[in-house]
Amino acid sequence: MADDEELFRVGLSHILNRYEDVDILFEADNGQSLMEQLAEAEELPDIVVMDIKMPEMNGVEATKMLRKEYPDINIIALTTYNTKPFIRNMIDVGACAYLVKNSAPQEVIHTIRQVYSNGFYYDKLVMESIRSNKRSTKPKGDKTSANGEFITDREKQILELICRQYTSQEIAQKLFISKRTVEVHRKNLLDKTQSKNIAGLVVYALKNELVPNIIIE
């Protein structure tokens, strides 16, 4: 957990430590401290809960560094700012989920579990923010262009279910195929869209309207 508000940070740690499936490895009061502790850590966390406004190194810069140096660590933004520009900025630099600090504890633990299981968790506000930041230009000669013609019908089916936050096992059961087949399609989608992870794949799909049938509840 990285947050410069000690009272909030300690309070949230106390709440999360009540859950058997959550273990707080360490806390940091700014992005620089977080990076230093990660560099010395014997065990890396699966998830970092990141505030945006912090001294020395803010959450945006820390997220950029984390994505570059520790790509397997998922980042959940947890902040007081809930406007679309802040949300888009954090998602664009690599956050896999976005929460505001007045969220209920049950919502926080649910998001952590979803990110751990699926690699991302985007609620209604986050999806609307991503969709409102569509690509305005089409890269010349880029096969991963916004028309989606490079994606097969089966891949589009799987992509839509991924965006609906189904797990690989759930997708396999829904489409009557093996989990391994789903994983192969997921890898192909990542390669074709040049996305680094599932969160990036979902952002790409929403921005380029590859999943127009998604209904945000």
Image: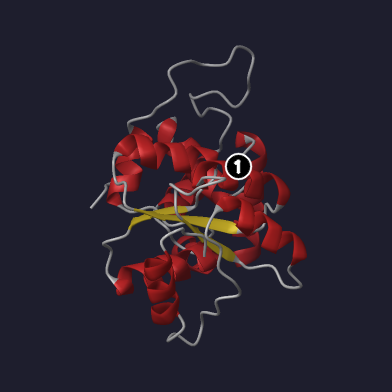
Q: Which residue is drawn at 73% across and 68% down?
A: 41
Most foreground residue, 9 or 150: 9
What element does badge 1 sit on?
Answer: helix
Q: Which residue is drawn at 49% across and 88% down?
A: 20
**With respect to residue 55, does 144 lie above or below?**
above
Residue closer to the observer: 175 or 147 = 147
Residue 179 visible in the displayed image: yes
x and y percentages locating residue 28 in the rendered image: 56, 63
Q: Is residue 176 visible?
A: no
Asked if residue 12 lies left or right of residue 38, the reply is left
Relative to 28, residue 71 above or below: above
Residue at 44%, 23% in the rendered image: 135
Residue 49: percent from left, percent from top:
49, 61
Please tell me which residue is depicted at 38% across the width and 69% down the height of the picture: 7
Q: In which quarter of the image is residue 33?
A: bottom right
Q: Which amino acid does label 1 sit on?
A: Lys
Answer with left or right where residue 128 lies relative to residue 180.
Answer: left
Residue on which the image places disc 1: 64
